[in-house]
Image: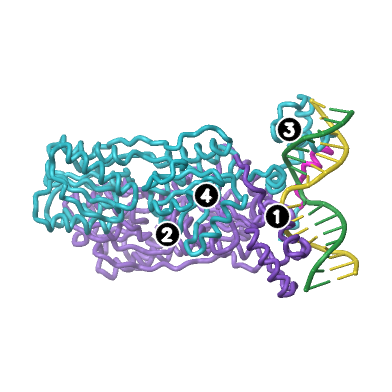
Chain colours: A cyan, B purple, C yellow, D green
Amino acid sequence: MRSEAQAPTLEMVAARAGVSRATVSRVVNGSPKVSPELIEAVSAAIAELNYVPNRAARSLASRRTESIALVIPESTTRVFTDPFFSLIIQGVAVHLASTDYTLSIVVASEANPDKTRRYLTGGNIDGALVVSHHSSDHSYARLGRTVPMVFGGRPLHVDDDERYYVDVDNVDGARVATQHLIQRGRRHIATIAGPADMPAGFDRELGWRKTMTDAGLDTSLIEWGDFSPASGAMAMRRLLARKTAIDAVFAANDQMALGAYAVIAEAGLSIPDDIAVVGYDDDALGSAASPALTTMHQSMTELGATMADRLVKLIDGEPVEHATILQTRLIVRGSS
Amino acid sequence: MRSEAQAPTLEMVAARAGVSRATVSRVVNGSPKVSPELIEAVSAAIAELNYVPNRAARSLASRRTESIALVIPESTTRVFTDPFFSLIIQGVAVHLASTDYTLSIVVASEANPDKTRRYLTGGNIDGALVVSHHSSDHSYARLGRTVPMVFGGRPLHVDDDERYYVDVDNVDGARVATQHLIQRGRRHIATIAGPADMPAGFDRELGWRKTMTDAGLDTSLIEWGDFSPASGAMAMRRLLARKTAIDAVFAANDQMALGAYAVIAEAGLSIPDDIAVVGYDDDALGSAASPALTTMHQSMTELGATMADRLVKLIDGEPVEHATILQTRLIVRGSS
DNA sequence: GTGAAAGCGCTAACAT
DNA sequence: ATGTTAGCGCTTTCAC
């Protein structure tokens, strides 16, 4: 298949520039102790030959791979479908594009966890990033002592303080959203919560509950969904079926909020007159919905970029805080 | 940072099993010419030592990297946000997880195209996959002769028959969708088309236009969007502003169809009674919308998996057809 | 500041 | 069927 001209090697560059291979290597790696003339000569030779260092050889000799893995548990494969995760991946990819690191996506098969484990510890990568909904996927945590790792989202159980992670402030975001509803005069504020075994689900419910309690309001109006639009619709249906007063709903994400929209309309109720709705995540469809959805915005690309940034620092041996918490902000639109 | 015990090498395995390094290598690579006893002995040694082959060394010696790149033009970075692309990536990742190949994501910076070009041609990968909305991104096409490449989506301009690509049948899908509307008795069928410089936009409009023409219907009811919900809403608004009869809308994707929903409702019209709506892509939100959206379904994960499959075959030197076209199917729901 | 030389861990002829 | 022997292309002491 490959019968192309032989790719230029460092040796060829050395010959052309009339220097040793060591010098070429130094120039390529930006070593400070090379005379300007030689740098010039070598650079010229590199340009003329269109030389590109061989990654494998460099990695073998230096024992560094210049590549980092983004681990995605197979069960979380829909990660790609969820805009939430997609944006994190995007943030990671774009940030890394500005560095010399290469990003490899690793889908961790649950059937064969050792394959992933071996990949991560087998010297294939300099560090790893782990994103997933479920805290159980922090099962890779112990590898963190072997290879630099940064997690997206905080661990649900804080059983390992050595862990590095970046997260958004879900509790505070939920507080802001709920507070907003209260300020708008709502008193019977229901919540469509996410799964309690996911930090985002747990924390957002917690923020809602605390805020309601602090305001002396009832916290019994709660139903759970799984972050999908359909589950949001079902939760709303159950909420309405209770036949108790409800004048607002705080959904743990926009997809569920939008699922609730349809049910509220079917019930002949209007948004926001009868029921105000606030979502979470600032999904693109929320702004196109009618009425446009009030929501909490948090930059997932920033989360991804921050994760990548921390990992690179970790690899370089720079000091890094174990926890990095990103801010959230309220975006008020027509639904509240 | 890394001060762990030295990773076991092939040589250590050889010593432990009492054989030569070549034999260990043969066992590791599944060569047929090794006696069962030695295979047994070597396997045992590998297990005891928990040996993992060094990727860099193997790659350097064999001149194969066992890794393939997924190239994403920076302008298409929102690729990650678009469920359409996310699913393709997912299909690629999951398929590759079952092979020995590693997937690296390459965000091709427009500012520095040479960086990507060098990465692709610099022996870092065995092959590349390219996905993007814009046909102009087929600019990597010429590299296809240097390194095996497979594109997602057909090239807009067929200027290179050597290109390998996998695509869904957009023209036929649009035909089926439009035909469905006609069979439902609709006659004034408008379309909210996607950008004409994207194959998906171009082809879906073409399918609509051909079907309408063949049925002797008017094809003047057309407005363009950019596949976003907001653009769909604006297109619908322009369509309604024409003040001509419209009893159905075929949107080039679900996101635009959903954007149109809100506008139709605002105008006091009902779906599907006044205006039937058919989308495209089978987005998750379409089924949660009210009424649920009729749409064309095409498996993007299958597209991704197929791309990966074709690329691996290409790398292995197996014969592969230049074009692979995947089927689409109509999903009838409440909106039509 | 620059070069010589010794590997990094593995594969692939070539022998036997 | 198994072992021997060269490298793959680069980094990195260690001399000069």
Above or below, A38 against A59 in this view is: above
- Label 2 near label 4: C-beta < 8 Å? no
Q: Residues within 10 Å of mark 4 (few under 14, many from 20)?
A: some
Q: From the image, which quarter does the C terminus of chain B lie in?
A: bottom left
Mark 1 vs mark 2: tell me if same chain: no
**Magenta stretch, residue numbers:** A5-16
- Residue, disc 4: A143
Q: Nearer the viewer, mark 1 or mark 3?
A: 1
Mark 1 vs mark 3: tell me if same chain: no
Q: In front here: B207 or B3?
A: B3
- Residue, disc 2: A75
Above or below, A26 against A136 in this view is: above
Task: Give the residue type that dot 3 points to.
Answer: Val
- Residue, disc 1: B9
Disc nearer the start of the sequence (3/2): 3
Disc nearer the start of the sequence (4/2): 2
Q: Nearer the viewer, mark 3 or mark 2?
A: 2
Residue B25 location (% of width, % of height)? 73, 62
Disc 4, SS:
helix
Q: In front here: B76 or A113?
A: A113
Question: What separation in Å lies between label 1 and label 4 (alpha carbons)?
Answer: 21 Å
Residue A272, image quadrant: top left
Disc 2, SS:
helix
Q: Residues within 10 Å of mark 2 (few under 14, many from 20)?
A: some
Q: Give the numbered dot on residue A112.
A: none
What residue do we see at 74% from left, 74% from top? B35
Task: Give the residue type that dot 1 points to.
Answer: Thr
- Residue, disc 3: A27
- Label 2 near label 3: C-beta < 8 Å? no
**Chain letter of disc 2?**
A
**Chain letter of disc 4?**
A
Question: What separation in Å lies between label 4 and label 2 (alpha carbons)?
Answer: 20 Å
